Amino acid sequence: MNAAATATPGEDELAWLRRCLDLAAAAREAGDGPFGSVLVDGDGQLVAEARNTVNTDNDVTAHPELKLARLAGAELSPQQRAAATVYTSGEHCPMCAVAHAASGVGRLVFALSAAELAAVTGRPGWDLPVRELFARRDLDVEVVGPVPQLYADAVALHRDH
């Protein structure tokens, strides 16, 4: 199991995370929570991207990570899922973490941790880090994050939201 991995993302990965922050900004502008995610295949190619649409879709499950987990499960083979990465602006909530695990996507990289988000917003969140959730099931999902280089940009999206 490698759910506790803390590797530092490279420049290509930082670019994917910046795209997630752009999607999060678009979600905020649309009146939704500022969260965005991308699914990238094992060759580093974009498979899909999504942003939070909880308010605009009037659907409490319309988190971008959940949308990408559904898509991965429906459109990628088990081998492709295992080699894929979800990049996301913020650490998964428990609902999205379980969907990620069930989909078989092998890697998760997030910019802002749930603890950092709670500190910025003053809302406690679920207090269940994704690494802990994955470890409870001994899942073979590599987790990278939070990413200090993107902290200021990620936090800015959540201030006064």
Image (cartoon, rainbow, N blue to C red):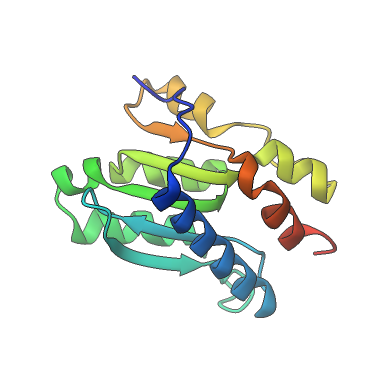
- Residue 116 is at least partly visible in this image: yes
Residue 24 in picture, x, y percent from top left = 60, 66
Picture quadrant of residue 59: bottom right
Residue closest to the eye, 57 or 40: 40
Residue 143 in picture, x, y percent from top left = 44, 33
At horizontal 54% and vertical 37% (from top left) the residue drawn is: 145
Residue closest to the eye, 16 or 114: 16
At horizontal 76% and vertical 43% (from top left) the residue drawn is: 118
Direction from residue 156 to residue 6 in the image, left or right: left
Direction from residue 103 to residue 129 in the image, left or right: right
Direction from residue 134 to residue 39 in the image, left or right: left
Height in image: 15 above or below 115?
Answer: below
Residue 78 in picture, x, y percent from top left = 16, 44
- Residue 31 is at least partly visible in this image: no
Height in image: 134 above or below 94?
Answer: above
At horizontal 23% and vertical 40% (from top left) the residue drawn is: 82
Residue closest to the eye, 35 or 5: 5
Picture quadrant of residue 101: top left
At horizontal 35% and vertical 57% (from top left) the residue drawn is: 39
How many numbered markers are drawn?
A: 0
**Quadrant in which the C terminus appears:** bottom right
Height in image: 67 above or below 53?
Answer: above
Residue 100 in picture, x, y percent from top left = 39, 45
**Quadrant in which the N terminus appears:** top left
Direction from residue 161 to residue 5 in the image, left or right: left
